[in-house]
Image (cartoon, rainbow, N blue to C red):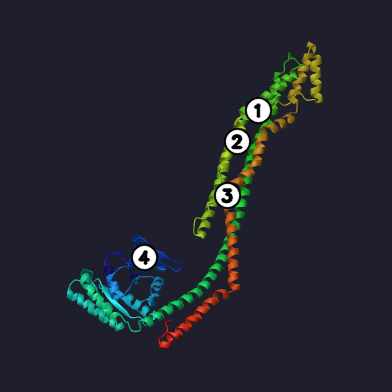
Amino acid sequence: MNTVLGEDLQDSPTSSMVMFKHAPSLEITEITDREMISLPEFSDFQERMDRRRNALESIIEFKQPNGFLQENKVAFIDTPGLKGTPHYDRYEVLKNLHVADSVLFVLDANAPFTEKEQTAIKQIQDLAPDLPVHFLLSKMDTIVGEREALRIYEETMSLIHSYLPDARVFAFSSQYEGAQQKELKEFIHSVKNTRNIEDKRLAKLLYFIRTTIASLLQKRIDVENQLVESVRWNEEMLMKLNGAVNQLKDTEVQKTQTIAKSYRAIKETIEKDLSESVPKMLQECSSLIKEDSNFSKIHLELNDEMNRRIQDYLEQTVMPKFYRSLQEWIEHGKEELEQSQEFLNEMGEGFNHMYGEERLKLECDFRVLDDWRRDTDRMTSRFQLESINILLKRTPAQFLLKSAGKLFGALSQNKAMLYNKYKTFVENEDYSEAIATVNKQFFQPFELFEKSLERDITLFFRSPLHVLNDSAEEAREGIQSNQEMLNKMNTNPEMFRDPLTLFDVRLRQFEWMTIAGKGMQTIY
């Protein structure tokens, strides 16, 4: 083809079908079942020639001014080679045989007319028994010696004639391109069969019209099968997606319970420590009571000291311990949430494998951990206890002691009795009410935080849940739309079939008026 066209189009064999034709100006077009695409640049043409995937789904029409093609009134369709070509691709090449007036089968002089090539010739004869086949013996310049070249040529021609007695063979050498132009021209004229050529071409055109009608009928079946398969696939995906949504919800509940339970255990441990330590601390305040104390004001002094000791204990002991425990709890929660993310990553990979593309990204919101760190830092950094009434209540025992202190505190002979009574009272008093008040104040922000955990974990899983729900809705819509199209096709099949039947009838009429009327055989 490089010799005929007078330029180097490509070094290696093409992977696409290309039709080379004379035209007043350069025009390159890619033709598919759906559209015709103009290729403005020669580089676009070369890219199509080099491709391997989906190479046979289109035909390239290459038009340019060419004296040889114009003078000889010939066009060439260059196809991919058949040697070593898979069966399906070989059929894709050979199914276009009827486009040609004759076949020029290219052989390699180093291994001419092998068993595989003989099989390919048989396939061509089966598909187009009336199509003339001739041969071009290429790479003759690689044969050493004129006598050896002549021997190979004669043996090859003899072998070919045993299969195809009317076939002609043209020996081609790239070293003698200029000299062989004339020989090639004579060879083309010798293999041209112009007898009834217009009628033959009309028969081929009618053949392709018939195959087009048949393919459109098959397309209708293909579309129906695709819709059925799409409905089935979407139903399967919907079931899997709904299962994934339920799994995610179960995971959310389980993680909420685990993380909240762990948090609650820490809070209960701190609360237990307070319930055990604060009473002892308050009882130890009895050491502040002396025989020479001012018993008219001792209850006020003791109440202030008890509040101060509770405040110091909470800030210096409880809150640091609480902070460390909460940091450990956050790390534990992080591990739990990371396990969930790994589970969702595996789930997403599974779905993307089924979709055949990276469609689902099930990414959780790890910002909740930052919120937890900020909130726990804030809650454990500072606490101001509102003064609580420990020894200023109106219980009978406290009322009597305070009254006695005011009444007898000034009398020195009564101080020993008051000292003993006050000391015994402080050491044996039930401080449960005071502890409950301290706990209520201290744990209030931590209880609010606990109530927000469920919401935070829901936010953590919100994005993956939305993605799965959206995908499930998409599958549901796909089922509905495809089922509606399928029902429409099955309810009114004549809408598609009747026009094609009309075309088929008109084709038969035309065949009788043209080809059959002249006694020519119709191509099927």
Q: Quadrant of residue 271?
A: top right
Can residue 112 be seen by looking at this rendering? Answer: no
Q: Secondary structure at mark 4?
A: strand
Q: N-terminal of the two: label 2 or label 1? A: 2
Q: Secondary structure at mark 2?
A: helix
Residue ID for mark 4:
28
Number of residues whose C-alpha sits closer than 10 Å to that of mark 2, classed few (under 14), some (14–19) or many (20 or more): many
Q: Residue at x 41, y 78 (%)?
A: 205
Left or right of residue 453, residue 204 in this image: left
Q: CA distance from mark 2 to mark 3?
A: 25 Å
The three-letter code of the residue at mark 4 reads Ile
Spot occupied by residue 312 in the image (x, y as percentages of width and height): 64, 25
| Quadrant holding the C terminus | bottom left
Number of residues whose C-alpha sits closer than 10 Å to that of mark 4, classed few (under 14), some (14–19) or many (20 or more): many
Q: Residue at x 81, y 21 (%)?
A: 400
Q: N-terminal of the two: label 2 or label 3? A: 2
Depth order, front residue of 102/249: 102
Residue ID for mark 2:
376
Q: CA distance from mark 1 to mark 4?
A: 85 Å
Q: Residue at x 43, y 79 (%)?
A: 207
Left or right of residue 425, residue 211 in this image: left
* Marking on residue 384: 1
Q: Secondary structure at mark 3?
A: helix
* Marking on residue 184: none
Compared to residue 346, the image places residue 485 above or below, namely below
